[in-house]
Structure formats: structure tokens, C-alpha cells
């Protein structure tokens, strides 16, 4: 009996502007590929069930749960992770300025959702930010600072 | 002794390493849990040594290499480690200054330290911290300072030294990979005490697994293949026995009927002439840690039989000792090294996953074993925070104030960490040895601020107060420490009760509290201040779906003073509109760090107050996912206004746990204000609100 474990495929993905070729099981998720094949540790595993947002990345500029998105559906898509943000990224600078974290485990995913929001809506209201971050859980209670930091980079 | 941390690490050289010229390395047994402790400790060293923070490195939580400071818990890191590091740095400078003065024929008062170099009469000398460390060593005892070395400093806020890296991913235990790594997962029984039916497994399956007793693990060099193999193996494992859970056992009122040993504190003569006795019962459900990241550990068993464990545990030394017992090893053969994980708020699965990795590692000498729990393991197998029930009685005098007050508490233990029993505190050990009964529940001693009895004596000027805790052994449930231990339930109960008494006396709850706090200046000050900031005096009357509540507590009755006002609205669900907090946390080292900790405590407590409750899933198991255990979301976030007041205290009082009691209590009192009567059971969910409405 052939095992599903042996069914692998070769895929080429575009991650942060670079083409990456990987060999993975046919049912591999984007999160598995990012962390375990490409060594990009910014995208985190929190639940694997679309319930915490720790794994959020951008696929063609929209936030996507990497923990359940199968890679074989991503041919030709542009994937962006926190590692793709520049050295002087204003959102990261604002989060540091506000010291908007405790453990910071939730932050890379939140940063990607906030990016997508700010790209779409450069001057969001507080309520827009709360809506955009609703897929994300933070157990340390850093919420107030995170929201303030994002508000501070909103264009007036 | 100014800090208990100095008991086992008496020498300056235990805390400071000056072997690399230009750099000061500080050693601490306290560990980073997301609370920013290492930043605060670097700041203390930097200020005491008058050296820029960039030149200070910190090494934390390595058995054998850093002081044994016990658990990083109880809001005690700055009071203990901070005080010790300050004294060690201060002693180091003063001994060296004397030495420089003697060699220059000057008086110590003429010697100053700047950027690590000693100056005499304003002229630079040849002596530096590093040259003197080489000359005289650091083998001298840390002296108790006449006054804090950093006295009179304004609280500053060194930014977190670890954040820039963590925001971009990386820097956590989950992210460590080594070339020799094997990935492993433990396959777990459906409930505590269930045993593996080994005979039901095929030869091949048995050969592919690590099995010791009922401890079963899958190991693979590819983490992707590991997940898939584990998924396929789970249905093939058969289990027998153990304690099946029922939803009845999870209800707080089940604690009343279960047996338990009773522990008493305080003294109450319930006999004084009173104008009536008032009694009320309050309860809280079981809660979960719910860290966003899944606990992870690495273990390496060397060819010569030494075990190195990398762990996010709160107590590396206690974990080392427990693993050594479990694996029957001498302490010298086990090293535990701390690495930061996702936020930790108590005894979660961190120690358990380390024991998992350790047990597996012995099967694979020379390889690094990595175990990361799944979300379902986090929820259904990590220790829970116990439910509890409190009955408060008070005898009232003519003025409507209590002459005496008693609390009868029933709860499970808050203390089942490694170190609380000689063995059996690690899940892997229970599985391997097929142990059905957990170590007996214990109550922490007064020295550690008590457990279920924490804050069970109210802070008010009530002449006779006593509390009794029935420590219940709950079958099938493993409970242990979570943020604040008993303080959450007890402060919720006492502060709700005080509001009920104020209502009976027809007095404003603020004035009623202040009248019971006469002579307690700092307590009254935070209450008055929070009232002023929130506009308490001008608040609208409760009802019509809105309400205001106030609460006060002093953590452990000896640490920070915290007062809180909550404004809520009810439209089916309770919504917190705004929360004001005023805290006196003693001397503040890192103001932003203290604020961040208190804010976090408030948000977590809001979540406990409104949303959290462990129940059984449709399959009669403990929760498996966030869907089974909802917590506060961004869209539930109110505005929070926090003031940390300038404190007269020369010592730091801690911050991490001080807000969880009063935050929930203020919210509950606001709900009572809106409804015209109390909801005495947490969480303040839609169902509870409706049934309270039907009662009033
Ligand atoms: S890990 Fe993807 S949502 Fe939690
Ligand atoms: S900062 Fe710890 S989970 Fe958000």
C-alpha cells in the first residue's frame, strides 16, 4: 500500500520576492513550508485551526492563515511574511516606540494584518483596527499598546 | 536579608562576571516570560554601575551557572533578583573604590566611577572594574546596603532588550533548530490515569514508537512527516482505565461536596453583638493558561550520559531536580537552560514538555530531541487553574459595618509544580509509571503569600477576620499555579460583598470603603485618585443597561495597592466601556515595564471576568481548541487609563499579578450596579446576567 507520507511534490513559491523550490508532502501547509523548509521563523504556529492568527501572512496582499492554506494552491501567488518588511519599516518602528508587546509571540501575525489594513486604508479609525485584528488573539494583554502603535502610523 | 535570592548566592562573583574587558555580565536565576524582567535587571545594573546598558549582558536561568532564585513567579522578580543585583553591583563598586583609594593614598570619597574606569580627585586612574576584578577577584560577600544604591533616582524606562528581534520572528524556543535534531510528539491518553493497552498494538507499530509504560512518542527527523505519522497512529492506540470527567465535576459547586483537608488563618470571634449576620456565596470556574504559543522543549542525551534540557520553565533548578528524580540521575548529570517562549502566566505545560523531551532523548544518544505540544495538548493536558467557591459571612454593627468577617473557601490546589512533591509532578513520569493519583494538594505557606488563601483576609479595618480553606482533591483534574493564585476569586468575592454591604447601608461604595480604611493612607490615596480620574462622584445612576463599579485590594496584603473603576454597558452581553486603574507599586525601576505588566494583568482579568470557563466538549473531553475556550478579542477591548503613582516606598512591590483581583471585582460591581443586584458567579456571561435579572 503506498503511504501518503511518501507522496511528495516539488513546488515553487514566491516568498518575499524570492522564488523558492521545496519538496513537501502533497498536503503540506504554507506554515509548514515557511518554518520547516525555508527556515522563516517569523510566521508562528499557535493553533493550526484558523483560531489565533499567529500564522498570518499576506498572499497577494490579503491576510491568510498560513496554518491551513495548502501550498499547492499557491502557484504564482506573492507571499509576504514579517521577514519581508524593511529594516526601517514604520509599523515595526511604531510598535517598538510604544513597546507594544509582552512576549511578542502574537506580533508577527498581527503586523501582517495591520500591514494589509494600512495598505487598504491608510487612515483607519480605531474601530477599523479592532476589526482588522479580530482574527488575532493576544494572551499577554498587549492589545491597548498594539492598537495605539498602529494608530500612530495611520496617516492623518 | 534584603533578598532571599542572596541566601544561596552570597558572593559578588555569583552575580557579576567581569572576565571580558569592557563588558559586564550579570547572572540571574529569574527568567524572561514575556514580562520584560531581563530588561529591568539590566537597567538596575546599568544604573548602579553607571555604565551604559549596551555594555551589560545578562545570562539567565542556567542551572549550575546562574544563582538558584527559585521560580520566576509571584511578582517577586524585581523585589528579589533586582534587589540582589543592585546590592551585588553596589558592593562590587564600594570594595573596589576602597582599594583604589588605598592604592592612591586618597579617601574613598575622592574616588568616582565613570564608564567602568575609576577616577581619583577627578583624574583617571589605571584602575577599571575589569582590572580590579583580575587583581582582587570577586569572591567577597554581597553586603547589605545602608540604603539602596540607586536611591532617589527617577524611574526611567530602558526599552526592552529583546523586542526588536522577537517582533520580526525568531528569538524563541520554538524557533531553535539544530542539524542533529529529531522531532517528537507524545500521544496522549483521553484522560488522566488511563493506561496504554500495549498488546493491542501491532509489532510494527510498537517498533516504530518510543514506549515506556503508558508514555508513547513518535519520533521523526522531518517535522512534517512527524505530524502525519502521529495523526495516523492516534486511532490505533487503545487506552483503559483512568478517571473520566463529567461536566458535573467541573462545576464550582462540586467542590462543596468533595472531601478535603481544611486550613485556617486569622481569628474571628463571631460573637460580638451584631445587628444581623449577612452571608453570600461566590464562585469562579476552572480557567486555562491559554498561552498563544505551544510549549516546547529540547533535550540532548550525550554519549557519556549527560542530559541537557532547553526549556521555557519558570523554575530551571526545580525542573532539573524533578527530571533527575524521574530519570534516576545524579544532579550533576542534568543541566537545564532557559529559553524564552510565548507568554507564561503560571505553571503551564512548560515543565511537562521538558520532561517529555528528556525521557525521549535517552533513547537517542547524541541527538537533540525537540518536542512541541499541539494546541489540543496545551488545553487538555496542561495543568488548570482551579475553580473555587467562597462563602462570606459578616456580623454588622449599628453603622452597617462588619464587626467580624469570615471566608469559607473550597478549591483545588494552586501548587503542583516540580518541587512541591518529591516526585510525580511531571506528566511524563505519571504516564511512564502509570500513576493514577496525583501528589496531594497543598497550600503555600504565608512566606510565599499563601495559595487559595491569598488575599482571603480583607484589607479593611474589620476587627475580627478569619478564613478557612478546604483543599479539595479533584479526581481527574490536575490544577496548579496561575497568575495571582487565590487572589482572583477572593478579591472578587470580598469586593463584591463589600459593595453589597454598602448598598445595604445605603452608602456610596467609595465612601463605605474609605471609612473602613481609616489610617491606611496609601490605600485611601489610590482609591481617591482613581475616583477623581474617572469622575466617580459625577457618574450617572446605575440601571438602564449601564453601570459603574469600584474595587480595591492590596496584593498579598503586603505588596502593591491597586484601585480600579469600571464602566460597563449590558446589551445581551456585558461590554466594558472603560477601565481606570490607579496603582502604588512601591519604588519603580522601569516605569514602562510596570505599566505594561499592570495593563496586561487588567486585560487578562477582563477576559477571565467575562468570557472564560473550562467546560467539557461534546466528546466529554477538556477543551481542545480556542473554539472550546473563547477569550477576549480585540473587538472587546475597552479604553484603559492607568496611573502609577509616585510611591513613598523605598522598595519595589512587584506588578505582574497585582491587578487581576481588583479588575474583575470592579467589573462585577459595575454589572451589579447596572442590574440592581449582584452576579456572584464568574464568568459574567449572558446566561448569568439573564438569570440574575430573573432573580431581581
Ligand atoms: S496557527 Fe493559524 S490561526 Fe492559529
Ligand atoms: S504579547 Fe504575548 S501573546 Fe501577545
Image (spheres, coloured by chain):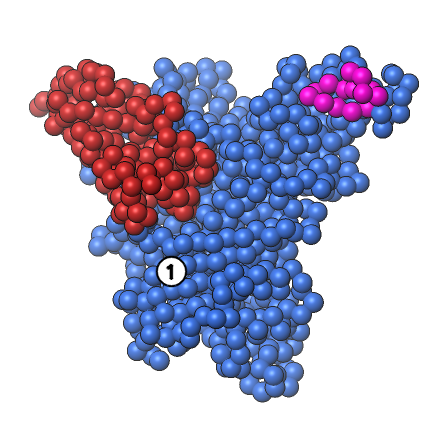
Q: Where B516 falls versus B120 (above or below)?
A: below
Residue B395 lies, in percent from the top left, at: 58, 80
Chain for colour blue: B
Q: Where A88 falls versus B675 (above or below)?
A: above
Is residue A94 visible to us here?
yes
Chain for colour red: A
Q: Looking at the image, which is closer to me, B245 or B20?
A: B20
The answer to whether residue A154 is magenta is: no
Could you tell me which residue is drawn at 38 percent across and 40 percent down?
A152
Residue B242 lies, in percent from the top left, at: 33, 49
Could you tell me which residue is drawn at 69 percent across and 31 percent down?
B48
Residue range corresponding to the magenta coloring: B111-124
Could you tell me which residue is drawn at 64 percent across and 86 percent down?
B273
Q: Name the residue under label 1.
A: B577
Residue B440 lies, in percent from the top left, at: 50, 52
* Quarter of the picture holding the C terminus of chain B: bottom left
Q: Looking at the image, which is closer to me, B391 or B650?
A: B650
* Quarter of the picture holding the N terminus of chain B: top right
Residue farthest along the left direction in this orientation: A1
Amino acid at each position: 500500500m503506498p503511504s501518503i507520507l511518501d507522496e511528495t511534490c516539488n513546488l515553487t513559491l514566491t516568498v518575499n520576492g524570492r522564488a523558492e523550490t521545496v519538496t513537501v508532502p502533497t498536503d503540506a501547509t504554507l506554515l509548514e513550508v515557511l518554518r520547516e523548509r525555508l527556515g522563516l521563523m517569523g510566521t508562528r504556529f499557535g493553533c493550526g485551526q484558523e483560531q489565533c492568527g499567529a500564522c498570518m501572512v499576506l498572499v497577494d496582499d490579503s491576510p491568510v492563515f498560513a496554518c491551513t492554506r495548502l501550498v499547492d494552491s499557491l502557484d504564482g501567488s506573492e507571499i509576504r511574511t514579517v521577514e519581508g518588511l524593511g529594516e526601517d519599516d514604520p509599523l515595526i518602528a511604531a510598535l517598538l516606540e510604544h513597546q507594544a508587546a509582552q512576549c511578542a509571540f502574537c506580533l508577527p501575525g498581527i503586523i501582517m494584518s495591520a500591514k494589509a489594513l494600512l495598505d487598504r486604508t491608510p487612515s483607519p479609525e480605531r474601530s477599523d483596527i479592532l476589526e482588522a485584528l479580530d482574527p488575532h488573539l493576544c494572551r499577554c494583554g498587549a492589545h491597548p499598546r498594539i492598537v495605539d502603535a498602529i494608530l500612530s502610523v495611520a496617516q492623518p | 536579608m534584603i533578598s532571599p535570592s542572596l541566601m544561596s548566592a552570597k558572593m559578588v562573583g555569583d552575580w557579576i562576571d567581569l572576565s571580558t574587558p569592557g563588558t559586564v555580565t550579570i547572572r540571574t536565576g529569574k527568567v524572561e516570560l514575556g514580562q520584560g524582567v531581563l530588561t529591568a535587571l539590566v537597567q538596575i545594573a546599568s544604573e548602579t554601575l553607571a555604565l551604559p546598558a549596551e555594555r551589560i549582558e545578562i545570562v539567565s536561568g542556567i542551572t549550575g551557572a546562574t544563582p538558584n532564585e527559585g521560580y520566576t513567579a509571584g511578582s517577586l522578580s524585581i523585589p528579589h533578583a533586582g534587589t540582589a543585583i543592585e546590592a551585588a553591583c553596589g558592593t562590587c563598586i564600594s570594595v573596589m573604590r576602597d582599594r583604589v583609594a588605598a592604592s592612591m593614598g586618597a579617601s574613598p570619597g575622592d574616588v568616582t566611577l565613570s564608564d567602568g574606569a575609576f577616577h581619583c580627585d577627578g583624574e583617571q586612574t589605571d584602575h577599571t572594574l575589569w582590572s580590579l576584578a583580575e587583581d582582587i577577584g570577586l569572591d567577597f560577600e554581597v553586603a547589605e546596603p545602608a540604603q539602596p544604591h540607586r536611591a532617589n533616582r527617577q524611574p526611567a524606562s530602558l526599552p526592552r532588550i529583546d523586542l526588536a528581534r522577537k517582533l520580526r520572528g525568531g528569538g524563541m524556543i520554538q524557533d531553535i533548530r539544530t542539524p542533529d535534531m529529531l522531532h517528537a510528539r507524545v500521544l496522549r491518553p483521553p484522560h488522566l490515569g488511563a493506561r496504554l493497552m500495549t498488546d493491542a498494538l501491532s509489532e510494527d507499530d510498537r517498533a516504530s514508537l518510543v514506549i515506556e509504560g503508558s508514555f508513547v512518542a513518535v519520533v521523526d527527523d522531518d517535522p512534517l512527516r512527524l505530524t502525519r505519522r502521529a495523526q495516523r497512529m492516534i486511532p490505533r492506540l487503545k487506552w483503559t482505565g483512568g478517571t473520566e470527567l463529567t461536566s458535573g465535576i467541573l462545576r464550582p459547586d462540586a467542590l462543596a461536596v468533595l472531601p478535603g483537608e481544611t486550613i485556617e488563618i486569622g481569628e474571628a470571634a463571631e460573637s460580638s453583638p451584631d445587628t444581623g449576620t449577612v452571608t453570600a456565596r461566590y464562585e469562579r470556574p476552572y480557567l486555562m493558561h491559554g498561552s498563544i504559543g505551544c510549549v516546547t522543549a529540547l533535550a540532548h542525551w550525550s554519549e557519556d550520559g549527560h542530559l541537557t534540557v532547553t526549556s521555557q520553565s519558570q523554575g530551571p533548578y526545580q525542573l532539573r531536580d524533578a527530571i533527575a528524580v524521574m530519570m534516576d540521575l545524579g544532579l550533576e548529570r542534568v543541566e537545564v537552560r532557559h529559553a524564552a517562549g510565548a507568554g507564561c502566566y503560571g505553571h503551564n505545560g512548560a515543565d511537562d514538555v521538558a520532561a517529555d523531551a528528556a525521557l525521549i532523548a535517552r533513547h537517542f544518544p547524541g541527538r537533540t530531541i525537540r518536542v512541541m505540544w499541539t494546541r489540543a495538548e496545551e488545553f487538555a493536558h496542561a495543568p488548570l487553574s482551579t475553580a473555587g467557591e467562597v462563602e462570606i459571612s459578616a456580623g454588622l454593627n449599628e453603622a452597617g459595618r462588619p464587626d467580624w468577617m469570615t471566608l469559607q473557601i473550597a478549591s483545588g490546589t494552586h501548587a503542583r509544580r516540580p518541587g512541591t512533591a518529591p516526585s510525580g509532578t511531571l506528566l511524563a513520569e505519571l504516564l511512564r509509571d502509570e500513576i493514577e493519583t496525583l501528589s496531594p494538594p497543598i497550600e503555600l505557606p504565608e512566606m510565599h503569600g499563601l495559595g487559595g488563601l491569598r488575599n482571603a483576609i480583607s484589607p479593611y479595618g474589620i476587627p475580627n477576620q478569619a478564613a478557612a480553606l478546604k483543599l479539595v482533591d479533584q479526581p481527574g483534574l490536575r490544577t496548579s499555579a496561575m497568575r495571582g493564585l487565590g487572589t482572583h476569586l477572593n478579591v472578587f468575592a470580598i469586593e463584591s460583598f463589600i459593595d453589597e454591604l454598602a448598598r445595604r447601608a445605603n452608602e456610596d461604595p467609595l465612601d463605605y470603603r474609605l471609612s473602613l480604611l481609616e489610617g491606611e493612607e496609601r490605600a485611601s490615596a489610590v482609591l481617591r485618585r482613581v475616583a477623581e480620574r474617572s469622575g466617580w462622584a459625577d457618574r450617572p445612576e446605575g440601571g438602564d443597561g449601564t453601570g459603574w463599579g469600584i474595587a480595591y485590594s492590596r496584593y498579598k496584603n503586603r505588596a502593591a495597592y491597586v484601585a480600579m473603576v469600571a464602566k460597563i454597558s449590558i446589551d445581551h452581553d456585558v461590554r466594558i466601556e472603560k477601565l481606570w486603574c490607579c496603582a502604588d507599586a512601591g519604588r519603580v525601576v522601569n516605569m514602562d515595564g510596570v505599566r505594561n505588566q499592570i495593563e496586561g494583568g487588567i486585560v487578562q482579568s477582563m477576559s477571565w471576568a467575562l468570557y472564560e470557563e473550562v467546560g467539557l466538549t461534546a466528546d466529554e473531553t477538556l477543551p481542545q481548541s480556542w473554539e472550546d475556550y473563547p477569550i477576549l478579542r480585540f473587538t472587546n477591548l475597552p479604553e484603559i487609563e492607568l496611573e502609577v503613582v509616585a510611591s513613598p516606598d523605598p522598595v519595589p512591590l512587584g506588578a505582574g499579578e497585582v491587578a487581576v483581583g481588583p479588575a474583575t471585582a470592579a467589573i462585577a460591581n459595575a454589572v451589579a450596579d447596572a442590574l440592581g443586584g449582584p452576579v456572584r458567579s464568574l464568568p459574567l456571561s449572558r446566561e448569568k446576567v439573564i438569570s440574575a435579572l430573573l432573580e431581581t
